[in-house]
Image (spheres, rainbow, N blue to C red):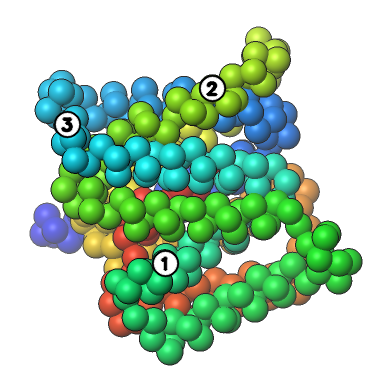
């Protein structure tokens, strides 16, 4: 067996494993938010993530961290990406999950490629094709079908959490477009580290008061396992593994796997959190993912780069 073929098979196994980790992560995060609350969880995450990311970068550059500092002309973009991609996006993600369900959260966040296409079209960077427009409309119809039971009770009851998650998906798409130039110049690991460095302080200040009101010493082992899973395994290790998978397989071959976390999240939420799904919800989820896939791949070119750096919460 050739080395390339062996690497391709190992990368496929690693990619599927990460889909399982990210799908399961939604149930862990939902439990953590129910126990800790949004503020304390954000504080712990934004305290741990930069430390873990820079530790990974230090290993990658063999301790020469000073050489990775961004050029002065790129600092404003790093700052903007940190505020949009981490402070705004991540804050909205966890707020939305706390108000929604694990399965709904996983499904709604798959709409990110739709917003990326719309932003690129608005900027004139890409012309939307008929298949992309059709796929977008199908995905929106699927989301409406998924939320139809709530919509029947009135727009006000249609799910604040799901609306927040849609805003989070849009914020991540905006971050994806903003970060593309610096990612090409510095690489994804440097961009992750310094956008976290600029985005984390605001969230730490914002979430510190609620963290101080939390009895950390009283947290159960399940909560600590959930924190390890969500922060270290899903976010840090998951990001590193997914970056390697995309380097071996390419973004175009890896991106379709990103439609696995929602059904995995649904099954895990059903088994662990007692979530229930009607036939209409399952149908709506299937239509939504089909529409997103149609819009993402309907242009005949590789999908947006956000597939290379997902955020599963």
Relative depth, front residue between 33 and 218: 33
User: Circle 3 sits on which residue?
Assistant: 68
Q: Residues within 10 Å of mark 1 (few under 14, many from 20)?
A: some
State the separation of the CA atoms marked 3 and 2.
26 Å
Q: Which mark is residue 119?
A: 1
Circle 1: element type: helix
Residue at 68 percent across and 27 percent down: it is 36
Residue 241 left/right relative to 259: left
State the separation of the CA atoms marked 1 and 2.
31 Å
| Tag 3 near tag 2, CB within 8 Å | no
Q: Which mark is residue 205?
A: 2
Circle 3: element type: helix
Q: Earlier in the sequence, mark 1 or mark 2?
A: 1
Res 221 seen here: no
Give the foreground label among 3 and 2.
Answer: 2
Q: Earlier in the sequence, mark 1 or mark 3?
A: 3
Q: Earlier in the sequence, mark 3 or mark 2?
A: 3
Instruction: Report x, y in % for residue 6.
Output: 19, 56
């Amino acid at each position: 067996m050739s080395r390339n073929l062996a690497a391709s098979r190992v990368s496929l196994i690693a990619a599927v494993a990460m889909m399982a980790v990210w799908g399961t992560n939604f149930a862990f995060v939902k439990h953590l938010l129910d126990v800790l609350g949004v503020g304390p969880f954000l504080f712990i995450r934004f305290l741990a993530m930069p430390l873990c990311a820079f530790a990974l970068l230090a290993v990658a550059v063999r301790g020469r961290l000073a050489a990775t500092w961004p050029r002065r002309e790129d600092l404003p973009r790093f700052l903007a990406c940190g505020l949009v991609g981490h402070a705004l996006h991540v804050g909205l993600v966890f707020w939305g999950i706390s108000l929604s369900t694990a399965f709904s959260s996983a499904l709604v966040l798959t709409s990110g490629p739709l917003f990326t296409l719309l932003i690129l079209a608005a900027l004139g960077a890409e012309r939307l094709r008929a298949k992309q427009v059709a796929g977008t409309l199908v995905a929106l119809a699927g989301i409406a079908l998924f939320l139809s039971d709530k919509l029947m009770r009135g727009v006000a009851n249609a799910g604040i959490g799901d609306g927040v998650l849609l805003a989070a998906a849009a914020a991540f798409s905006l971050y994806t477009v903003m970060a593309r130039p610096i990612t090409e110049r510095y690489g994804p690991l440097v961009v992750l580290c310094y956008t976290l460095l600029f985005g984390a302080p605001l969230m730490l200040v914002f979430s510190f008061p609620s963290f101080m009101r939390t009895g950390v010493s009283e947290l159960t082992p399940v909560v600590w396992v959930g924190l390890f899973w969500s922060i270290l395994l899903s976010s840090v290790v998951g990001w590193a593994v997914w970056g390697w998978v995309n380097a071996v397989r390419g973004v175009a071959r890896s991106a379709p796997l990103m439609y696995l976390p929602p059904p995995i999240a649904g099954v895990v939420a059903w088994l662990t959190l007692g979530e229930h799904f009607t036939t209409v919800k399952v149908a709506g989820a299937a239509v939504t993912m089909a529409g997103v896939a149609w819009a993402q791949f309907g242009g005949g070119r590789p999908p947006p780069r956000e597939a290379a750096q997902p955020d599963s919460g």
